[in-house]
Amino acid sequence: MMPSSVELYPVNNFIGDIVRSIFPQPAAAVINGLLALLSLMALVGSLGAVLIFLERKVSAHFQLRFGPMRVGPHGLLQPLADGIKAIFKEIIKPAGADTFIFFLAPLLPVSAAFLVLAVIPFDHHLQVADPAGGVLYVLGVSGLSILGILLAGWASNNKYSLLGAMRSGAQMVSFEISIALLMLLVVMLSGTASLRGIVLAQEGTIFDWWIFKLPFLGILAFIMYLVASTAELNRTPFDIAEAESELTGGFATEYSGISFAMFFLGEFVNMFVAACLVTTFFLGGFHAPLLGLPLLDPLLKLIPGFLWFFAKAFLIVFLYMWFRWTFPRVRVDQLMYLEWRIMLPASLILLMLSGLFVAQGWVG
């Protein structure tokens, strides 16, 4: 059953209440929808600049460099300069390319991230929508990223692009199975497929988060989800879809200007979305990391929930960046072996063991 605490925190926020108090219901719903849409657009746009800057700085410090330093203080305006350059660069379409699909493909990964962000509970009162089957919704719309890459490779009329797209499709579809099984594990433990319900099921101390509440298996599920999500994001060490040393640029080989920038933006925003899902499923979402200490816990509760959520999400983002600049790229056959011979059987076993815990009443 859904936790009773769900009813304690309605999704409505004070901005929506003000709009509803001023305008009649049909108009208020439209205005609130537009405000939510604009908020998500602002979030996606700002995340792209922030994450690109962080990626460059993190990689630079891992390699004992400074990273971008010249444009703005400490290079803070470098993402803005890159964006302006991408907008004004010429977009070149290869001869023989399918024009409509070629220009449609870069929009799909960003659209997938946008749609998933709409159901992420950033705080008790910061969520655009909370469908009862939120987990199924996430699994459904996230497939747009895979579709965008496949279409880009096919429409480019380039053998390297097509090969990169086929690699990416096989990789992302394969690891999607393990991700779905690990999500199902959390749904079973929480008793709800609502993302907000999953977060509220972890209310309490840090030991009520699913990473710790499920003895040992929670930590294992968390590590497996990190690995599977890294593969689904096509990031090193699983970036075989863009392997520059083999495929020049993979599915994005023929893209330039703003079209390439959209793929670039989609990659980074989807990385943040994956971090948000990890935070939601395993790290208590917007709940503060309470330790059961009477003096410290009240101070931790003073910090707004959305700040805790973003702090946890950016910690996971840092782990994704750490992976990229630490591990070498694996071969295609090694990647498929990891999923079908290790990750998938381990996910099934983990799901059965967790079901045993729930059936015996050891978790609840």
Image (cartoon, grey):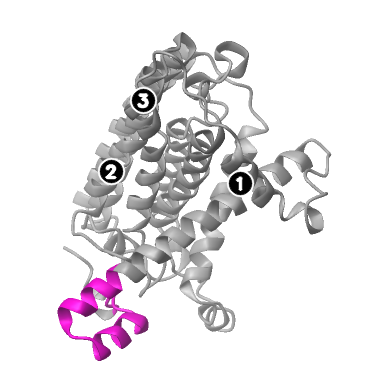
Number of the label disc, if any, that sits on residue 148: none
Outermost residue on the bottom side: it is: 21
Please state if 58 lies on the left or on the right of 363 as rendered: right
**Residue mark closest to the camera, 2 vs 3:** 3
Q: Is residue 86 left or right of residue 36?
A: right
Residue 228 coordinates in the image, percent (x, y): 43, 34
- The magenta segment: 9-33
Residue 285 in view in this figure: no
Query: Is residue 82 among what the camera can see?
Result: yes
- Estimate the spatial distance between the alpha carbons at disc 3 and disc 1, rounded to whole Å: 23 Å
Give the distance between the C-alpha atoms of the residues marked 1 and 2, in whole angstroms.
Answer: 27 Å
The one of 223 and 257 positioned closer to us in this rendering = 257
Residue 79 higher or lower than 93, as above or below: below
Residue 99, disc:
3
What residue sits right under mark 2 in the picture? 141
Q: Earlier in the sequence, mark 1 or mark 2?
A: 1
Residue occupying image coordinates x 40% and y 51%: 277
Circle 3 crowding by C-alpha within 10 Å: few under 14, some 14–19, many from 20:
few
Give amino acid for label 3.
Answer: Thr
**Residue closer to the observer: 257 or 263:** 257
Mark closest to the chain's N terminus, 2 or 3:
3
Disc 3 is placed on an element classified as: helix
* Quadrant occupied by the C terminus: bottom left
The residue labelled by disc 1 is: 83
At a point 46% along the width and 30% down the height, the residue shown is 231
Residue 4, percent from left and from top? 21, 73
Looking at the image, which is closer to me, 91 or 317?
91
Q: Position of residue 320 (x, y in %)?
A: 57, 41
Residue contact at pointers 1 and 2, CB within 8 angstroms: no
